[in-house]
Image: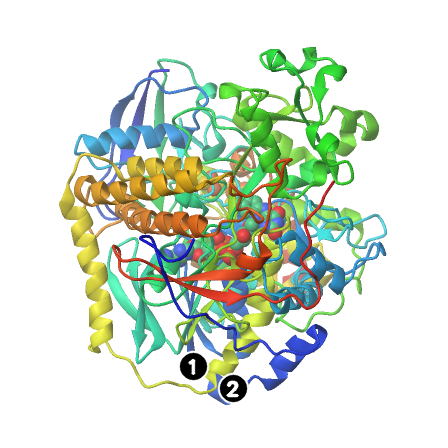
Amino acid sequence: MSANDFWADGEPVFDKAAPDGPVETRWERRKFAAKLVNPANRRKLTVIVVGTGLAGGSAAATLAEAGYRVKSYCYQDSPRRAHSIAAQGGINAAKNYRNDGDSVYRLFYDTVKGGDFRARESNVYRLAQVSVNIIDQCVAQGVPFAREYGGLLDNRSFGGTQVSRTFYARGQTGQQLLLGAYQALERQIGLGNVEMNARHEMLELIIVDGKARGIVVRDMVTGEITTEFADAVVLASGGYGNVFFLSTNAKGCNVTAAWRAHRKGALFANPCYTQIHPTCIPESGSHQSKLTLMSESLRNDGRVWVPKNAADCQKPAGEIAEADRDYYLERIYPSFGNLVPRDIASRAAKNVCDEGRGVGPGGLGVYLDFADAINRLGRKAVEAKYGNLFEMYERITGEDPYATPMRIYPAVHYTMGGLWVDYDLQSTVPGLFVIGEANFSDHGANRLGASALMQGLADGYFVLPNTISNYLAAGPFPKVTEADAPVVEARKLVEDRIEKFLSIDGDRTVDSFHRELGQIMWEYCGMERTEEGLTKAIGLIRALKEEFWTRVKVPGKGEELNQNLEKAGRVADFIELGELMCIDALHRRESCGGHFRGESQTPDGEALRHDDEFSYAAAWEYFGADGRPVLHKEDLNFEYVHPSTRSYK
Amino acid sequence: MDIKVRVWRQPGPSAAGKMVTYDVKGISPDASFLEMIDVLNETLILDGDDPIAFDHDCREGICGMCSMVVNGVAHGPEKATTVCQLHMRKFSDGDVIDVEPWRAAAFPVIKDLVVDRSAFDQIIQAGGYITAPTGTAPDAHATPVPKKDADAAFEAATCIGCGACVAACPNGSSMLFTAAKIAHLGLMPQGQPERDSRVIDMLQAQDDAGFGGCTNAGECTTVCPKGIPLSLIGRLNSDYRKAISKN
Ligand SMILES: Cc1cc2nc3c(=O)[nH]c(=O)nc-3n(C[C@H](O)[C@H](O)[C@H](O)COP(=O)(O)OP(=O)(O)OC[C@H]3O[C@@H](n4cnc5c(N)ncnc54)[C@H](O)[C@@H]3O)c2cc1C
Ligand code: SF4
Ligand code: FES
């Protein structure tokens, strides 16, 4: 499908920052070629970092250590609470401490392949290279990773790989890594090198003379709107999974920072690439406000099954004979079994439920059974590995997973798409850098388990601090003031929007719109997408947008703590993003990674890529809320890992 | 289930607050406590009332953002459980449930159930870290850490910084929070160089931020969602004595 009513074709986009030549030395050569800022000048340069998760926290701390002045923002009451805190399973690194044949090249290979050949080789290779430094850095900070009796670090294996390269801290790896970054950040705050602004939300990007020079923020306690200036702006604002309303993301996760930048000219790449995680606790009713992930590490020891016969689905699991159970992942994918990548595991669960063999309320669930593991390893060993996850499951469902198998179902978990960045992690707006889940860079169409933490910390500790200097070397840039026209205009945009929300005074709550958007997205832009469904969804979203702006009811005032006003801004942006996601999904008439098009599958129901037509990243340009977005393609070239059909059979 | 909630309503930091009673009807026992408040808020909004402000984010018991005193107990009746992980099946039809904010001198109320906990960040700023600037680290295997120590450090590091310990303490003391960080870092070889200055500076910051003194009441550990044990306060005190005797 080419340009039509929904979008227009534009010029290709190129990554001019990545060196060519041997992939092993590209990062070394880029670092060498990048201009440096002399230490005495760094004090004169200010960098705004939006977000304090693994990406933003590590970047802010590292930039401050290097001598830059940093202003940091997050919407929570403390930088320690960024959503990275919730990551459970682990972080990958090519340390090869197991001596099981791992290497930088293998991690690179696995990630390119796992991403279904839709990521840039240069970026992924660099990610694998710096992965080893991350573990060193975190250990030096005192991150209490799991260890073996000899005192050395322990590893586990994770979905999509055949080596053990995942470092972990029980089921709280994200928490421990984030606390490491947070503590480094607090140290810099204490030293006066970072100005921390918690409970502050970025609502607009300020561009002066074509360069990102600041942001408009709202103090979420007083409602005061201020404009903040810097020599460069870094967005580390996380992913947009909450466009589905129900997801495993924290309730406040949002796309606003990224979307506002997109509206100001930053291209948004591959928005439709969404990861649906196979092991989440199923929905329990209409009150459901979020979904809870059960770490994928559970698939190392748990076995996934459903009854062979739909008639057995209502029976308690214990009454279903072994012979009547279908361990469908082990059956269909004998070599990877329960450890197939996430997208495959999710779709397989949907398929068996669509066949009427799902278990639990509404037939939307499959079993994850630990009976064999408990027999083999003993309850104690299972408890030591997964105790906290089992407790969490019991708290939420009221069922004991040691006695009855867990029920799980896929849920939206991660978004591979994000703002387009070059090898330097710079967006199409000069001076605007994007790191962590907020960018689109390293995971292609599907992210492997334990690779998001790796990417967030790689970007924040090791990549951005080296590349941003190349940009900042030309600074300090001319002083920006409140009175400059672009600043006045950006501030007015924010104020007008808030006033508009508060004045509509309709008859529907913000949450009701969010839920409805989520249902549309899950139904038509979820695990399986079709031309017909997506076209319908675009119509529904447009109607919803219209309704939102005429019927939403936002109580209270702007000059106070007003959580519904915060939500209204986020939902308004999610609605626009949702439309773009559907357009992106519609234009990509192939299946790849987390994007499965019903029309593009093999006879046995596997995803079918079309490399001849779609071996590119789709970077979208904003053309007004009612205009057609413009598609810019970045061609992907594979010099090392040649596209093949993924096979986990 | 049909229940009543009596909720602390306070429009702003300096405004007076009071308990207000609301009916919540037809709530599912599978709903979480926060989902119950969500449902109530939806009705309040449509009725033209101000919805209840409360802090929350992950709703998985890990970010430490949620903070409500339920029936007089910080995080509510279920042991080792944050209020976001508390479910309505723990209550009975017809119950009247009191919901209040954290109350402590160092955590002033901002609105309704939302309080200001930035004093915790100040304690960490004072020394709750290991100085290890990016890029200076040796190989991760350079220093083995006995599994026993690594595991104990991890247990202490699971503190989510929620502040329930402070809310439960009759003195509004932050000792358990501080002790957890001192133990986490002090149990690792990497944490030794700054061990003395860390404990001295963090205790000073705690006093400066307006937290009360510890009298070993033990209420903190009872409400702690992560089960941080009281013994860590003993450990902190012993670290402190050693540190000042050297200085
Ligand atoms: C439940 C769960 C488990 C996971 N487990 C794993 C795992 O085991 N391994 C793995 O590799 N990955 C895992 N992931 C994915 C991984 O946790 C995330 O991709 C990663 O932590 C994102 O980090 P980040 O720094 O990019 O963003 P986040 O941690 O989401 O931080 C975003 C920051 O931006 C701030 N922010 C956002 N918008 C604004 C705004 N408008 N104004 C001001 N501030 C703003 C927020 O306050 C926050 O500080 C998991 C994800 C989930 C949901
Ligand atoms: S010690 Fe426990 S109660 Fe206190 S802040 Fe930490 S987790 Fe919360
Ligand atoms: S909302 Fe995160 S711990 Fe309760």
Q: Position of residue A607 (x, y in %)?
A: 60, 43
Instruction: Provide the secondary structure element on which disc 1 rests.
Output: loop
Q: Quadrant of residue A209?
A: bottom left
Image quadrant where one finds the C terminus of chain A = top right
Is residue A79 at least partly visible in the picture?
no
Q: Is mark 2 within 8 Å of ligand 1?
A: no
Please give the residue where the numbered disc 1 appears in the rendered image: A45
Q: Identify the residue shown where x is 61% and y is 30%.
A: A391
Q: Chain of mark 2?
A: A
The front one of A373 and A159 is A159
In front of the other: A29 or A395: A29
Q: Nearer the viewer, residue A257 or B117?
A: A257
Tell me which corner region of the image, top left, top right, bottom left or bottom right, holds residue A265: bottom left
Above or below: residue A394 compared with residue A56 = above
Q: Describe residue B200's horizontal placement relative to residue A90 as left or right.
A: left
Real-space Cα distance between discs 1 and 2?
A: 10 Å
Identify the disc placed on residue A37.
2
In the image, A379: left or right of A367?
Answer: right
Please report the residue visible at 55 percent of the width from the left and 72 percent of the height from the top: A423
Q: Earlier in the sequence, mark 1 or mark 2?
A: 2
The spot of residue A442 in percent (x, y) is 58, 61
Callout 2 secondary element:
loop
Q: Position of residue A73 (x, y in %)?
A: 40, 62
**Do tag 1 and tag 2 residues touch (Cβ < 8 Å)?**
yes
Residue B218 vertical placement versus A118 (above, below):
above
Whether the residue carrying mark 1 lies under 8 Å from ligand 1 is answered with no
**Along the line of sight, the residue nearer the viewer: A9 or A145:** A9
User: Crowdedness of circle 1 by 10 Å Cα count: few (<14), some, many (20+)?
Assistant: some
